[in-house]
Image: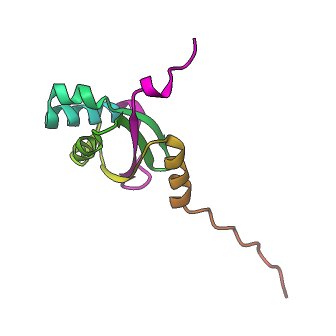
Amino acid sequence: MSPRPPTLRENRRYLLVRVEPAGTVIDQKDLYYAIADAVTSLWGDSVAGVITQAVVAAENGHVIIRCQRGTERELALALSTVIFCRETRLALRIVAASGTIESLRERIRAITPLPEPVPEHVTGP
């Protein structure tokens, strides 16, 4: 089956979200349900159906969330209301929005500090 031509594809946007507090381990599926509940409670079922959010990736304390183009604002507002994922308290902070996942992964690499080299012990007199 051949891929759809660009004119027939759905336009999507991706949000890069930082999970606070740092080091919080969350399951992508649980986070999806927390976000879906927030979108539905804030905007209702009809808008939630238009947004069609999905958690694409979770890595290095960041999450990439997909939505339809033009609904980034509504999704960002709903993300700001998420305070729990299962029994874990957390906050979701929007870092960036983009049309490609790869550009957001580059931003994660730029944000995440490189580990510092471990100094070797110098033996001396």
The answer to whether 63 appears left or right of 91 in the picture is right
Quarter of the image that includes the C terminus: bottom right
Q: Residue sitting at 44 percent across and 27 percent down? A: 7
Quarter of the image that includes the N terminus: top right
Residue at the top extreme, as displayed? 1
Residue 122 is at least partly visible in this image: yes
- Above or below for 52 versus 64: above
Q: Residue sitting at 84 percent across and 84 percent down? A: 124
The answer to whether 52 appears left or right of 119 in the picture is left
Looking at this view, is 55 or 88 the one in front?
Answer: 55
Looking at this view, is 43 or 80 the one in front?
Answer: 43
Where is residue 112? Give x, y as percent. Answer: 53, 58
Residue at the bottom extreme, as displayed? 125
Magenta span covers which residues?
1-30
The answer to whether 117 appears left or right of 15 in the picture is right
Residue 25 is at least partly visible in this image: no
Residue 15 quadrant:
top left
Residue at the front extreme, as displayed? 7
Where is residue 81? Give x, y as percent. Answer: 21, 46
Q: Residue sitting at 27 percent across and 39 percent down? A: 71
Residue 10 quadrant:
top left
Q: Residue sitting at 69 percent across and 68 percent down? A: 118
Where is residue 116? Give x, y as percent. Answer: 64, 67
Please tell me whether residue 19 belongs to the stretch shown in magenta. yes
Please tell me whether residue 24 belongs to the stretch shown in magenta. yes
Where is residue 19? Give x, y as percent. Answer: 38, 50
